[in-house]
Image (cartoon, rainbow, N blue to C red):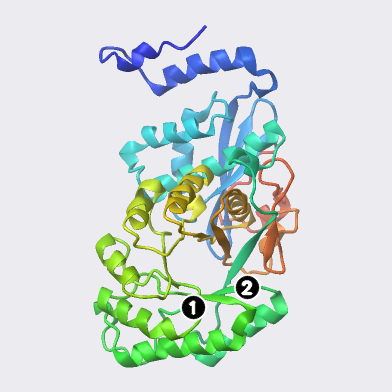
Amino acid sequence: MGVDYTRLHDPNAEYTMRDLSAETMQVTRERGGDRDVEITDVQTTMVDGNFPWTLVRIYTDAGIVGTGEAYWGAGAPELIERMTPFLQGENPLDIDRLTEHLVQKMSGEGSIGGVTVTAISGIEVALHDLAGKILEVPAYQLLGGKYRDEVRVYCDCHTEEEADPIACADEAERVVEDLGYDALKFDLDVPSGHEKDRANRHLRDPEIEHKASIVEAVTERVGSRADVAFDCHWTFSGGSAKRLAERLEAYDVWWLEDPVPPENHDVQREVTQSTTTPITVGENVYRKHGQRRLLEEQAVDIIAPDMPKVGGMRETRKIADLADMYYVPVAMHNVASPVATMGSVHVGAAIPNSLAVEYHSYELGWWEDLVEEDVIENGYIEVPEKPGLGVTLDMDAVAEHMVDGEDLFDEA
């Protein structure tokens, strides 16, 4: 038996991807043995972390469950519930096909970006965990194998006085000495006290000097012990961003992140190409198509996709492959729980051009409690060898930290 592909080219045929899926799956089940598995349900629970994390679980008729996570934000659970019927009865091993199936089915919801892609990302991560468990391989094997046994983590740092250069330097030293990180990031879009009108995005010289004083204090304090990046959160005009980046060329800046708003690629390219300060962009565009112009036009020195937001693990792998064609490294943005963080680690292990994965929850004392395994040690995450993502939800911790009104997952 085979699939009648002629139907794809017949404009009069009543064809849907679901039809092709059913025919394909009939062949697969005749040949697949233990890989003959069907999705029965998809459930979500939101955890109230330093962001509202949307955890996703996919259930199967084999009793195997996969866990994933969507980038935080309202609407993802409702969209995942709407997508569940498109997945029921499908084989979870068909990760790429199912992901594209969801993109097509949700095209009316705007599946080229925004929360729809975020919701699909959460499902895609759970599919990797599930497929790894079915095949009894770690998730990185599904992405082509690994380049490294551990992935570097950079710690997004904060202080009560974020505009105070000495306070930032003190916190940098504490995180390096006490917590063991050798990669850090601080915010630069902090009030300097010299602003006249922040809405116009213009930086006056005293504001630039204030930001330079933060960079100088932090980089000189940690010296060669740590790399330090600085985040601008899309705050400045093109001209101001150029002036700021030029001013920071005197310091050992790992990268300057998102100095201008994300919509205008032409301005982004001009800023990046105007300075020797490395510029990082990427968390606020979606899928490989959104990252394409940044890379093709050499508008970025380091690309920073957010894996559970940008389209999932395979999509991030595709972005990394495109970046590698332009010899651009990847520093994954990440504000996730341990679940999606570990998903990013598997991607970071599988791509050659990985720099680091962000960690945004060092001030949240129970972050690692959500899973049974240890995660970060001395600023690095060891790539798990267990099947799937290699982390196991602690259901008691999930229940304790759920958003009010949420329901706990069903048992496997």
Instruction: From the viewer's perspective, tell me whether residue 245 is left or right of residue 352.
Output: left
Answer few, some or many: residues within 10 Å of disc 1's Cα (few below 14, many 20 plus, some between 14 and 19): many
Q: Position of residue 290 (x, y in %)?
A: 35, 51
Q: Which residue is mark 2?
A: 363
Residue at the spot 41% in from the left edge and 23% down from the top edge: 17
Q: Which mark is residue 253?
A: 1
- Residue 95 in percent (x, y) is at 53, 34
Q: Marks 1/2: CA distance?
A: 24 Å
Q: Amino acid at mark 2?
A: Glu
Residue 27 seen anywhere in this rendered image of the structure: yes
Circle on res. 55: none
**Where's the C terminus, which quadrant?**
top right
Residues under numbered marks 1 and 2 in contact, where contact means CB atoms less than 8 Å apart: no
Looking at the image, is mark 1 or mark 2 nearer the viewer? 1
Residue 190 left/right relative to 243: right
Quadrant of the rendered structure where residue 260 is? Answer: bottom left
